Amino acid sequence: MGEAFITRRSSTAKEQKTIFNNTPMVAVKTLQNALSLGRFDMAVASDDEYIAFLCGLDGYGRPVSNLDIFTRSGQHYVAYWPDELTDMAAVIVNNWLIGICGRGSDSVGTKTVKRWHMYNAIRDSGIPISMSTITQYDPLYGACAAPFDDGIAVFGGLIADGQAYDNAWKYSFLNQKDYSNNAGFSALFNLPTPRGFAAMGKLTSNGVMVCGGINQATNTVYSDVNVIGKSVAGSIGFSSRPALSVAQYKATQANIYTQGKTYLLVGLGLTLPKIQGSLVVPARIVPNIDVYACASEAQLQIDNNKHSSFTLPLEGNPTSAVALSFGDCVLYVVGYSNGVTKSKGYLVQLEPLRITTMEFNFSRNYTQGGVIGKDVGFLTGGNKNGQLSTDVEMIQLLRNVPIYPGMKYKVGSMASEETSNILTLHPLNDEIKLSGYMKL
């Protein structure tokens, strides 16, 4: 395996060096106090340029309307949604931020679906446009949504008593309130198992999967996996796929694109709390990851069979998890409730399966996050080092070793070191050995 190290020149340089090899490395930058308000249970949505953290619960458990938007460079914008909500679903599609349902301060869900053009949202200009409400159904929270067929698909959710719904809907991103269903809102069908807080992942432009979920009224967690797909003929239907390895809700979902196929990884969801004598053992993160794949056959969008399953080597009992998709790999970040145990990272690559473990220099729990355009990941919300936090962690993968102007370096079989006069990158592969240093 090729190696590289960059270090400060010193009599103890060997001890100070950082080793680079052909494993992508994770770089973390903290934006201190960047979030407008520390909170939990936000809706998170991202596209190729922005990530949005919408509404949520403040430190007193009250729904809020704060909207924090970040660019891939960390530039920050603050705006405010017209409603104070939590347990929302949200997507960014065709430059529109769409917020779906949610639960207010009275713990009752809402029927509202609203959209705000990102041009206006980053300027906190105007107000979001009210789209058609889910008029034939009770107010919902805990629904799931994903881009689908030049619009969005929405599934399930819970009502005030925790009863789960099984309905699926389709919205055009230009749908407006009081328009007919033909203007962009339509009820699709009922999936076999009603549930809320399911994971909804996209495998093709016309194929999404709904995985796991919970019915709080019956205290039941599910492992069901369903596909919502649009056929060549234009009809939209559903089918089932092999179940998740473990029943769970609020599972993470992430995509990997490698070896010419797109894969959906689902897992690290929550189990139900358990009663042991007079004690209640909190819900725990399951270590299982199930992998589904897009089909290579023209007549099928998503493979009928599960591609694979594996288990992450989780340490202890983490209580929260975030999945960050970086194209050909996924970084899972898990946190612990004690505020002391450092958050752990698991970088997963497929074909062949490879899991690289790491430890971060912070302890985060109930954290949420996402990735802008497979490039820059963001973690925020919840507790950090035992306290409600407004810090934001930006995460990137280093796939090349940067050589900066003024750095003395030596590559491979070079007879002597040289001084760089430009910024350049050397790939992390099996064929290169690089050493160098800068005066710091």
Image (cartoon, rainbow, N blue to C red):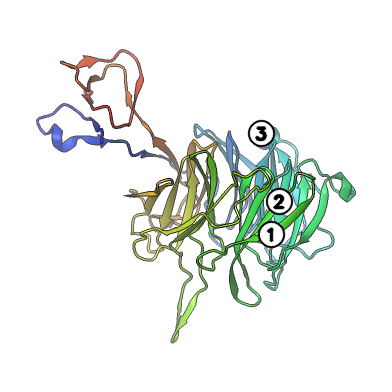
Q: Quadrant of residue 56?
A: bottom right
Q: Is residue 229 visible?
A: yes
Q: Residue at x 64, y 77 (%)?
A: 218
Image disc number at residue 229 = 2
Quarter of the image containing the N terminus?
top left
Residue 435: image location, x then y, percent:
21, 26
**Farthest left residue in view:** 11
N-terminal label among 1 and 3: 3
Q: Between marks 1 and 2, how big is the CA–CA gap?
A: 8 Å
**269 horizontally vs 174: left or right:** left
Write down the residue under mark 1. Answer: 239
Amino acid identity at mark 2: Gly
N-terminal label among 1 and 2: 2
Q: Is residue 327 above or below residue 314?
A: above
Q: Is residue 82 visible?
A: no
Amino acid identity at mark 3: Arg
Q: Between marks 3 and 2, how big is the CA–CA gap?
A: 36 Å
What kind of element bears circle 2? Answer: strand
